[in-house]
Image (cartoon, grey):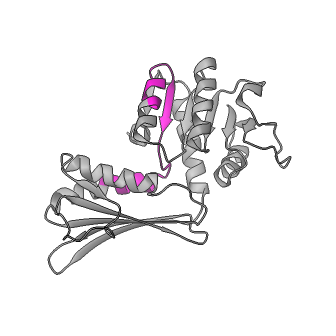
């Protein structure tokens, strides 16, 4: 399998390239990033229009603007793409859905099997602990650009879907002078140090609380998940796929 890594000079891009090299029957044929550091053992293109080879699949760990340039390339050349980039707006998500009408796209804000299992568990707990106040706390390294994390939103969305979309997300209580609403999910972001990713969902009841936490200590978890997604989507029909499809 010939792989193009978009965002190849980033932390996750480097991790993906390393894991691909360790995998059997896979190879990174090129990368794309805004600069070529000269440190890679594969060609790096700084402009999508300069790409000289056609891969079997694209793995994208970049930023939204770069993702859409890569989607244009993928659509033109009919190359399946795995999007692990986060920070898309609602309108950008709708654009990705339009691309998926003409292209196989696998998209997940978190490529970890365990975090997606956690999303399933907390959605079931939300039904059983229906009178609880629900709060989500996410912690990441100080270089992370988007807030809240895409993973925090995965967890919130899974709970909200289970509760028939009755919940509202609260990101900032500092400017409010009122008590907590029962139909809100508080989402809080912490940034510092080199924390790879830690997510907690807390259910507060009367005189007790229930907390589930997932703590990731290595980026290799996400890289291996992205490779599994690439293998999964390689021969799929056009459409938008997610980790739920992979886990079936």
Residue 134's spot in the image, x, y percent? 25, 65
- Residue at x 60% of width, y 25% of height: 72
Relative to 202, say whether 114 is above or below: above
* Residue 180 horizontal/vertical position (percent): 20, 68
Q: Does the magenta stretch include residue 230?
A: no
Residue range in magenta is 95-120
- 161 relative to 45 in the view: left or right: left
Q: Is residue 151 left or right of residue 65?
A: left
Residue 193 as seen in the image, left or right of residue 127: right
Query: With respect to residue 212, does 67 lie above or below?
Result: above
Q: Nearer the viewer, residue 236 or 25?
A: 236
**Could you tell me how many numbered marks the image carries?**
0
Q: Quadrant of the C terminus?
A: top left
Quarter of the image where one finds residue 246: top left
Is 100 within the magenta? yes
Extreme residue in the bottom direction: 207
The N terminus is located in which quarter? top right
Image coordinates for residue 47, horizontal then vertical, percent: 74, 32
Query: Which of the 4 image quadrants contains residue 91?
Result: top left
- 232 relative position to 48: left or right: left
Who is closer to the viewer here, 176 or 98?
A: 176
Q: Please report the residue visible at 63 percent of the width from the left and 33 percent of the height from the top.
A: 58
Name the residue nearer the viewer: 179 or 223: 179
Q: Which residue lies furthest to the right in this view?
A: 38
Give 195 or 218, whichever is nearer the viewer: 195
Question: At 43% across and 29% down in the image, what residue appears?
Answer: 97
Q: Where is residue 49 in the image (x, y as percent from the top left)?
A: 73, 25
């Amino acid at each position: 399998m010939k792989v193009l890594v978009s965002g190849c000079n980033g932390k996750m891009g480097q991790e993906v390239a390393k894991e691909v090299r360790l995998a059997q029957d896979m190879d990174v044929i090129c990368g794309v990033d805004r600069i070529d550091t000269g440190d890679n053992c594969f060609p790096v293109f700084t402009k999508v229009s300069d790409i000289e080879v056609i891969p079997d699949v694209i793995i994208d760990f970049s930023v939204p603007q770069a993702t859409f340039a890569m989607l244009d390339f993928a659509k033109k050349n009919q190359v399946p793409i795995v999007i692990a980039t986060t920070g898309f707006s609602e309108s950008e998500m709708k654009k990705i859905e339009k691309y998926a009408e003409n292209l196989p796209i696998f998209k997940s804000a978190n490529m970890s099997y365990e975090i997606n299992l956690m999303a399933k568990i907390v959605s079931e707990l939300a039904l059983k602990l229906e009178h609880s106040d629900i709060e989500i706390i996410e912690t990441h390294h100080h270089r992370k650009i988007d807030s809240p994390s895409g993973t925090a939103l995965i967890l919130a969305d899974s709970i909200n879907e289970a509760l028939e979309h009755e919940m509202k997300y609260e990101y900032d209580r500092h400017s409010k002078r009122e008590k907590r609403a029962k139909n809100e999910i508080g989402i809080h972001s912490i940034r510092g140090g080199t924390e790879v990713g830690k997510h907690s969902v807390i259910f507060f009841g009367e005189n007790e609380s229930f907390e589930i936490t997932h703590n990731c200590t290595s980026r290799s978890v996400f890289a291996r998940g992205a490779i599994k997604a690439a293998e999964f989507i390689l021969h799929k029909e056009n459409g938008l796929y997610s980790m739920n499809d992979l886990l079936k």
